[in-house]
Amino acid sequence: MKAIEIRNKYLNFFKKYGHSVIPSAPVIPENDPSVLFTTAGMQPLVPYLLGQNHPSGTRLTDYQKCVRTVDIDEVGDNRHLTYFEMLGNWSLGDYFKNESISMSYEFLTKELGIPAEKLSVTCFAGDNDCAKDEISYEAWKKAGIPDERIYFFGKDDNWWIAGEEGPCGPDTEMFYDTGKPKCSSECNPSCDCGKYVEIWNNVFMEFYKDKNGYTKLSQQNVDTGLGLERMTMLLQGKETPFEIELFAPVMDKLVELQKVDNIESRRIIAEHLRSSIMIINDGGRPSNVDRGYILRRLLRRMTRHLNKLEIDLNSLEEIINISIDSLKELYPELETNKNTIKNVIIEEKNKFVKTLKHGEKEFEKVANKTKNSGKKVLETEAVFNLYETYGFPPEMTEELAKEQGLEVDMSDYQKLFKEHQEKSRMGSEQKFKGGLASTGEIETQYHTATHLLNAALKDVLGEHVHQKGSNITSERMRFDFSHGAKMTDEEKQKVEALVNEYIEKDIKVEKLEMKKEEAIEMGAEAMFLDKYGDIVTVYKIGDVSLELCGGPHVESTGKLGHFKIKKEEASSAGVRRIKAILE
């Protein structure tokens, strides 16, 4: 069964049970500073999980494009992916555990045809915060899972929360038995031996966690996630996701083009290329900070491994075409954006080739310094700097060193690399640790202020201005917009004055719900029009602003305080960025 068939079966199944099919949000989140990318299907739905009414109702289903960056350096093995698609269904205060489990079992056994004996499940064992999940246990037994294939585990295995704070609750997870023998008499779904593969996770959100602990949510929600690539792999009887139709054509082409055989490099190229294509398609561009740096890192790692296979880099355009052709059935928009995607990737590849040349010159300095000091082993810090600053792979450094009669202590390098990796990961977690619901009063004010800023920019600079992205924290707002030139001081002053004029007028902020076509006819603006369903939420601020948006917003503009632009700068080609505060 192909990936597109599984996705369609999923959406149609839940549609049959009264779920509205909503579009995937972009992989680049709108107004969510807590994460670099959309990492889960529930992320764009947090306001509705907390009680806000969703325009499409209380039963929803979709596929969500996701990017998770924690394991980039693990990609190349037989299972890790940076980009993946998550199928999900939600109950927003509607059905709960019994109905959710019943539908999940029916979909797996009837729609996908998985034999019941291949399924094992896990439930929450209970602790001081939440009782043992006997309801899920009984529901699984009623569905048809015998006692010996129902397991109970604690919070580490059967509790879900995004970040450190936010909506959360116990979950029940479904596992596929691959038929491999048990690694021991204790082997169960929590084991990593490969016998059991997790295929679906149903989270029963009934709590909210903050720094003071757990409180009950105003409504009980269900949030589920089923990984499309993993399910496709299992149903096709493949050992790795790189053998399914989303990767196989690229993998085959790399075998044809390579002069050196290395399956790890082929997986890295195929995976990083696909991830980059999806990020660029949703507006991402390479840079030296945040998500732009992740994209740059993916593309440069991909290029290094093309070099490692000794593939002519002029073949990259052909490889991109093959990857897009493999994906366009799932994502037709890739065909529309094909030229842009290719241009961004090839331009970044060309920049990196130049960077590698600089790295070679820097290597010569390091090698000469080592030889002049009478040493035979390059300093580990210098080897790491060649990698970190110039993207120079340590394997290449080792090879060049060998040619000059020098050595690289790779074990010492790996130790330093692991330390750096851990620091980076901790830094990233610290920076984006707020969870997915850290939208307090101040963030809400900034959210409304972005609408006023967008309107003011259009008024001062022209109707060509459109929002290209934003990032909001409790300290400031950052707003990216389409404009080809640096703003003059006079233009900045006019925009600032206009936003403050809107604030002083204390204009009412109205929330409207209507069909998407009506909103477009009214002239409502939207950053990603395709991400909205047939029924949309539109925020109207007098005759100043009309935008499709999920909220949240203040009741009137007078609550925003004083708006001040702190900085205006380039973000990327044709895109400017404003950083501003509310005083």
Image: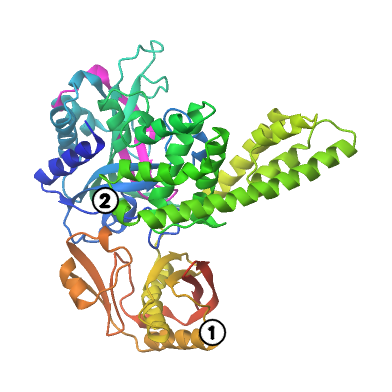
SS at mark 2 in the image: loop
SS at mark 1 in the image: loop
* Residue 348 shows in this picture: yes
- Position of residue 447 measured from the top left corner of the image (x, y, whole percent): 38, 70
Q: Residue at x 16, y 72 (%)?
A: 518
Name the residue tied to disc 1: 488
Mark 1 crowdedness (10 Å alpha carbons): few <14, some 14-19, many ≥20:
few
**Left or right of residue 365, residue 132 in this image:** left
**Left or right of residue 467, residue 3 in this image:** left
What amino acid type should be assigned to the residue bearing mark 1? Thr
Q: Residue at x 61, y 44 (%)?
A: 423
Q: Which residues are magenta?
A: 143-172
User: Is residue 151 magenta-colored?
Assistant: yes
Give whichever of 410, 464 is nearer the camera. 464
> Eyeballing the image, is 26 above or below 452?
above
What amino acid type should be assigned to the residue bearing mark 2? Pro
Give whichever of 500, 474 is nearer the camera. 500
User: Is residue 251 magenta-colored?
Assistant: no
- Position of residue 104 measured from the top left corner of the image (x, y, whole percent): 19, 34
